[in-house]
Amino acid sequence: MGKKLKVGKTRKDKFYHLAKETGYRSRSSFKLIQLNRKYQFLQKARALLDLCAAPGGWLQVASKFMPVSSLIIGVDLVPIKAIPNVVSLQEDITTEKCRQALRKELQTWKVDVVLNDGAPNVGANWEHDAFSQAHLTLMALKLACEFLAKGGSFITKVFRSKDYQPLLWIFQQFFKKVQATKPQASRNESAEIFVVCQGYLAPNKIDNKFFDPKHAFKEVDVQAKTVKELIPVKKPKAEGYADGDLTLYHTFSVTEFLKAENPVDFLSKASEITFDNAGLTSHRATTNEIKECCRDIKVLGRKELRLLLNWRGKLRKFLAKKLKDEAKELEQDMSFSSSDEGENAEKESKKEPKKSTEEDEEDAEMEKKLAELKEEEVAELRRKKRKLLKERRKQRERVELKMDLPGVSIADNNDSSMFSLHTINKAKALSEFSRGDMKAADAAVDEEDRDDDVYLSDGDSDKMSLASDLDPDDLEDIEQRQKQMDAKKGKKKVSFNVEEEEEEGQGNELLVDLEGKEEKRDSETSLWFSKDIFSELDLDADADREIRQAQRLQSRPSGDKSRKRKAVEEEAAAEREEAGPSREAGPSREAEGSEGSSSDSDDSSDDEREIAHMKKASGGLAGAAGAEDDGDFQVVPVESTSKRARILDPEGLALGSQIATSKKKERDLINGSFHRFANSEDMCDIPEWLLEDEKKHRRRPVPVTPEMVEEYKQRWKEINARPIKRVAEAKARKKRRMLKKMEQVKKKAEAVVNTVDISEREKMAQLKSIYKKAGVGKEKREVTYLVAKKGAGRKVRRPAGVKGFFRVVDGRMKKDMRGEKRKERRGGGKGGKGKKGGKGTKAGKGHANKK
Ligand SMILES: C[S@@+](CC[C@H](N)C(=O)[O-])C[C@H]1O[C@@H](n2cnc3c(N)ncnc32)[C@H](O)[C@@H]1O
């Protein structure tokens, strides 16, 4: 028999070798390194206690990661070889002696971290081993509870057995956060798991049952006091009695309870609720239990208090409904009495003696008041709704005009209202101001404010809440009935808009519109069209074009019908010409032509109609900017100053550069523009070819050198060669993203390279996966597809001329697909027998297909 192969735990794995390489005393050092990497408890610790520390791997790690001159103590059954700056004790952590030794060592100090990697001698049987492990952990916890500072951490090894859950529960009683984890260095086949407990609660008293395995593991004593219970709760601060309140017993009536603004607050103050309303006492919601609860509020629990609150809600709903019914009855009575007033009055006076008792009067009075109350309520609701809608509309407008951001309103801020003329927009307030009666004016303004105020007085809020108990349908119903009643009473009802207009009519005289209605509309229109979305549309140019078209049509000589057809062509040519740089100075062709327009004829009526239509279409702009022909007078068109800058071509730019450099040159250029070609003659009877020729030659050369023009041409080319802004921006964004990604990948790679606890091969694998995930360095491979010859198999030699990657594919699929297509073309796949796939394909070299 040969030597037995090492299996499972005894196998020397990478961490074993790594520990040997790096000088750690045990492979479990890497467990602590990995735990610390995740939870970062060593860096902050100033004192540490390592229970079951031999041979000292964890102590090494602790002394490496903890701040210099920290206190580190290690305890184990076996002696630990000395480690610089580490105190080691040889003790059994389950004993009192060990506890005392630690006390002696630490004196009054508390530690920030307690570690426990204890593993008792095992081998008896699984259950026994598991128990002794759990017991050791419990003992470690006991020591931790004694020596840990508040907020400290306890990191312990636990074996997964039936005692695992009870242990976790106990940890949770002492620590804020308890997390279980299995570090990479811990073998998968091992049942160990590491529990990281953070935020030690440091209770004043601890029940020893927690550390008694009998209680802790077998039957966890649920009744045992929890740590939270053991932590003394601070006494609430004495607040004393309220002023004038000398008794602790407060009795309130049901009505008061129903009216209470904050019922919860009310219940906290009340000792007893008495019944002052027979109707409410006999209400079916008022059960015996409720009555009993009302007798002593102070003894009630959460459930009973909730019961009382529900009861209150029911009663309020009941009352609201009652009010509604009463209002309905009142209305019916009114309609009944108004229609049959005459007859019934006579009949009743004859039949019965008049029943005019005081009670009836009181009832009527009550009902009237109720109706008024409801009316007010509904009016209030309507007013609020209107105000809300108005505000929303305003906000929308402000957002549209880019005065506000959506959801953020600067205009909502009313701080400046005291300086606003709008606050005294009532004539009454203004007159008070002008008389110098500031008090009265303030009152008037307040009155105005109150109309729109969202907040209500106490009484109002109660009314409002009553209304809120009603259904929306009910409200609508009430509203409608109210309207009918108003109409019957002959009340003068006016719509909201009319009301507003009236108010405006007698408004503040100081609030005068700076613009007329027309101007206001124009400015609003221009504001609207100044939005970004319209910036692409050259509205000015469009308007100008229309004007010119109208003028040209107007200036056409009468009788020349052949010209009429060409008008459009001419117009287009003229526009093209205008776009050119060397537009001749001097009177325009329009002006020339317009001379002829004074001689009207019958044929021109169509044109005139067209012009009128166009003028109308151009919104009156034609009249402002274009030439007007008013009888014998010819109005010279004035170029609009707001006209957009024309984009010049290279010749124009060269000319412009000359003007820009010298005033004299500018003057010369202007003077030079008055030459014999500048004033065109009447060219009506000139043949077309001559006109074309004239256009070319009847112009003075522009005083710029061809070199200058060439230079500007080059500049244009350069500008045109540049990518458009958006493309450039997108490219820049992509580049930035890429750089960022690279930076992150670099950091990750560095971290992997610097990791000590993994082998080189693993590092390589991790690096590869990092770069792969980031998509860096992933270039699309150029693959050449080769269709294999029949029976060639998968192994094909690289054919001549094929470079790089190549893949051999089966030609049949391609052929099948072709066949399918052919079938379809022939019509619904009814193509005769036809061999499937047809003849064999020529495979090999000739079919190389690059992708
Ligand atoms: C896995 S080793 C600890 C390894 C240590 N964390 C390191 O990194 O070197 C478990 C240790 O627990 C110790 N041990 C077991 N029962 C103990 C007890 N009752 N008191 C003290 N140490 C104990 C053993 O002596 C053993 O050295």
Image: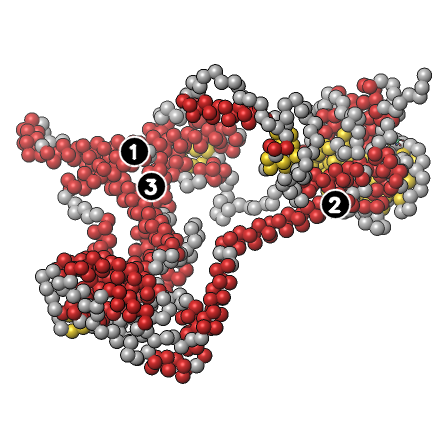
Which amino acid type corresponds to the residue marked 2 in the rendered image? Ala
Residue 284, percent from left and from top: 37, 24
Q: Which residue is mark 3?
A: 463
Quarter of the N terminus within the rendering: top right
The kind of secondary structure element at disc 3 is helix
Q: Which residue is mark 1?
A: 473
Closer to us: 579 or 774:
579
- The reply to whether discs 1 and 3 touch (Cβ–Cβ < 8 Å) is no
Examine the image and state in which quarter residue 637 appears: bottom left
Which residue does the image show at 42% across and 23% down from the upper left?
A: 826
- The dot on residue 564 is none
- The tag earlier along the polypeptide, 1 or 3, is 3
- The tag earlier along the polypeptide, 3 or 2, is 3
Rounded to the nearest angstrom, the CA distance separating label 1 from label 3 is 18 Å
Closer to us: 600 or 542:
600
Relative to residue 102, is residue 731 drawn left or right? left
Residue 27, percent from left and from top: 85, 35
Q: Which residue is mark 2?
A: 751
Which amino acid type corresponds to the residue marked 3 in the rendered image? Lys
Ligand 1 has an atom within 8 Å of the beta carbon of the residue at disc 1: no
Q: Above or below — where is 206 with respect to 642?
A: above
The kind of secondary structure element at disc 2 is helix
Relative to residue 417, is residue 305 drawn left or right? right
Which amino acid type corresponds to the residue marked 1 in the rendered image? Asp
Relative to residue 76, is residue 506 drawn left or right? left
Examine the image and state in which quarter residue 633 appears: bottom left
Residue 451, percent from left and from top: 30, 52
Q: Is residue 773 visible?
A: no
**Which residue ends up furthest to the bottom in the rendered image?**
664
Quarter of the C terminus within the rendering: top right
